[in-house]
Image: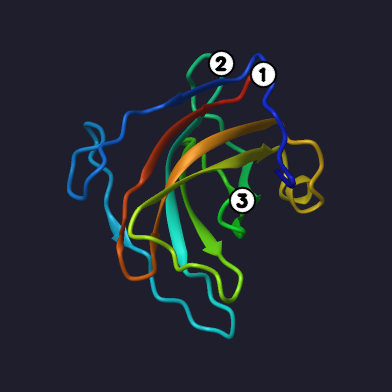
Amino acid sequence: MYGMRTAGPTLLVFLLTAAGCHGAVLDPVQPEWRPCQPNRGEFPPDGCALLDGTLVTPRSEPAASFVVTVDSVDEESRSWFTAPPAPVPADGSLRILVTQIRPLGSEPVAARVVRTLEVRVYSTIDDARARRAPRLSVFVPMVFTPWGVLVEPTPVRLAIPDV
C-alpha cells in the first residue's frame, strides 16, 4: 500500500484483546468510549478510530519524547487515514484520534469497520513532518466508526526496539 513500510524483526508489539460489541470491557482499565465528534468544513472526515495505549522501551519502561503519527492510504476503501504528529508524554501514554477521509461518491463508513494501518514513531516532530525513516513502524488493526457514533478504543502497546 502507498506509504506503507514493513516492521523490522526486533519489533515488539502487543495488541490487547478487544471485544467486538459496544459496552464491552476491553481491559482492566476500561478505557473510555467517546463518539467521533461531528466535524465541519467543505470536506470533513467521515469516520474515526481512537488509538489508546502506551509506548515503552525494551525494558517495559515508559518511552517519552517521541512523536506518533498515522498517515496511510487504504486501497480497499479508497480512503485516507490520518492523525497529526502527537508528542508522547513522560508516562508513555498514547491517545490518538485517527480520522478517515473517503473520496466523494464512495460508500459511507459502516457502523464498525476494522482497518489495518501503519502507526509510525519518530524521534522528533520535524522527522515526522519530513517523513524521515521512523524509529518504529507497525501495522495496527483499528476499529473505525462514523461521526457521531461511539468509537471503540483500539488498545495497543508499542515497544521501541532500542532507546
Q: Secondary structure at mark 2?
A: loop
Colour mode of the rendering: rainbow
Q: Secondary structure at mark 1?
A: loop
Residue bearing mark 1: 162
Residue bearing mark 2: 58
Q: Amino acid at mark 1?
A: Asp
In the rendered image, residue 4, in percent from the top left (x then y), is placed at 71, 40
Residue ID at (59%, 76%): 104
Q: Are marks 2 and 1 in contact (CB under 8 Å)?
A: yes
Give me the C-alpha separation between circle 2 and circle 3.
Answer: 30 Å
Residue bearing mark 3: 74
Residue ID at (25%, 37%): 19
Q: Which of the two discs, 2 and 3, labels the residue nearer the N terminus?
A: 2
Left or right position of 122 against 108: right
Q: Amino acid at mark 3?
A: Asp
Residue 161, quarter of picture: top right
In the rendered image, residue 76, in percent from the top left (x then y), is placed at 58, 51
In the rendered image, residue 115, in percent from the top left (x then y), is placed at 49, 46
Q: Which of the two discs, 3 and 1, labels the residue nearer the N terminus?
A: 3
How many C-alpha atoms fall within 10 Å of the one at disc 1: few (<14), some, or many (≥20)? few
Q: In which quadrant of the rendered image does the N terminus lie? A: top right
